[in-house]
Image: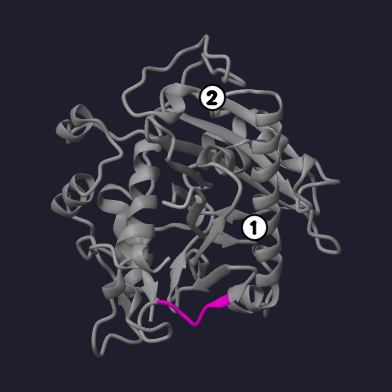
Amino acid sequence: IEPILAAAPLPECGVHLEAGAAPLLVMARRSALVVAALLASGSLLTEAEQDDEESTMTIREGLLIEAKHRLNGWFLNQSWRGKEFGTGNLDYPKEAHGIQLVITRGHYYCDSESKFGAVEVMEVDPEAAKPDSIPITFGRFDVENADVVDVFNALADTQTQAQWDDLIKGGPGVTILGDFPAEKARGAAVSFVAHPFPDRQVFQWQVYNSSKNMDDMWVVFSTRRNEFLHKFLEKEAWPAMQAHNCLGAYHVMKLDNGNCHVVYTTMVNPHAPWPITPKFIFNLAWTKTADYIVTVRHRAQLLKKQRLEQNQPAKSVIPDWLLYDGVAPNKSDPGNIKWYDGEMTKVTPPYTGPDYVSDVIQFV
């Protein structure tokens, strides 16, 4: 863990606290120069995609860049994190089963798109409608006796998640809404069982990335800009509620000892009733999150055991055109689940362009 934390920090491009700023909103705009620096630091995009600065990014590109930004530029960057927990942008961590979980001290907007107004209005008008603001969660853990692709498959194969995830078992489960070549992304509706409370359902984009040898892999989820996905499935009936995971990302890496290290972030707004706060939920339920991670470990270990027993090569469950940079969409790829051939209006990715200001406002 420590060598990863000691990695060279990326350019500072997050939200930073300024002396004397409270209780104002502190904002930061990610400029084209900062995006270029992020890309140059270990690009997830092809050179052609970087050169075409005028083109609109796909959902895949936008979410992968922001995922890398949050994990490398924020969580693993000591100048942003602080030399000690509780002194910078992160609170004091929780630890169990070799898992570390921590939330940000500040809150960030995460809600339905209809709640986001013009930033100029939200900034100056205390009466203006605003989205909910919540802390961002970060975490890290190791996985023994599994390869990177096994951990990746456990996280990426949401279609089979109801078979092993207690948070989904017994409910409507997972519906794959489509594989969308225009955005190089998959869409899914996932319902989480929250007994004795109503189910929480999310309509989310799912994007992926991998090195060619599959020793460095990403899984990213987001409920942002998901209006198009609602065309493919009716919302779960009342009393179920629509929840939001504005950015969830898992970065799985191979360690020198053959095991895997995972760094991850989530930004979940379950829309709990007042006066329950997101921080209260984290402090109350963080052990459930740790239990889920333990289950992911066991799932990855089982997947490796099964493929070795069946003498099968390591293979991703995600089709190559969704996984690798520079691969054209392929309708005949056996990894496709529900290829979408219809018309699709271009979706503007979140966390890009001028609206990046309103996406990452932090309350201080």
Q: Position of residue 184 (x, y in %)?
A: 43, 28
Please identify the quarter of the rendering in which residue 87 is found: bottom left
Question: Who's the residue at 19% across and 62% down the image?
Answer: 11
Distance, label 2 to label 1, CA atoms, is 27 Å
Question: Who's the residue at 66% across and 50% down the image?
Answer: 296
Q: Position of residue 24 (x, y in %)?
A: 32, 81
Q: What residue range appears in magenta?
A: 90-94
Residue 93 lies in magenta, yes or no? Answer: yes
Say left or right for 244 vs 116. right
Question: Who's the residue at 17% across and 36% down the image?
Answer: 53
Q: Outermost residue, front direction?
A: 257
Q: Position of residue 152 (x, y in %)?
A: 54, 41
Say left or right for 350 vs 131. left
The type of colouring in the image is: one colour
Q: Earlier in the sequence, mark 2 or mark 1?
A: 2
Q: Which mark is residue 293?
A: 1
Element class at badge 1? helix
Q: Quadrant of the C terminus?
A: bottom left
Q: Is residue 118 visible?
A: no
State the residue in front, 234 or 154: 154
Residue bearing mark 2: 179
Q: Amino acid at mark 2?
A: Asp
Q: Is residue 340 visible?
A: yes
Q: Is residue 218 above or below residue 83?
A: above
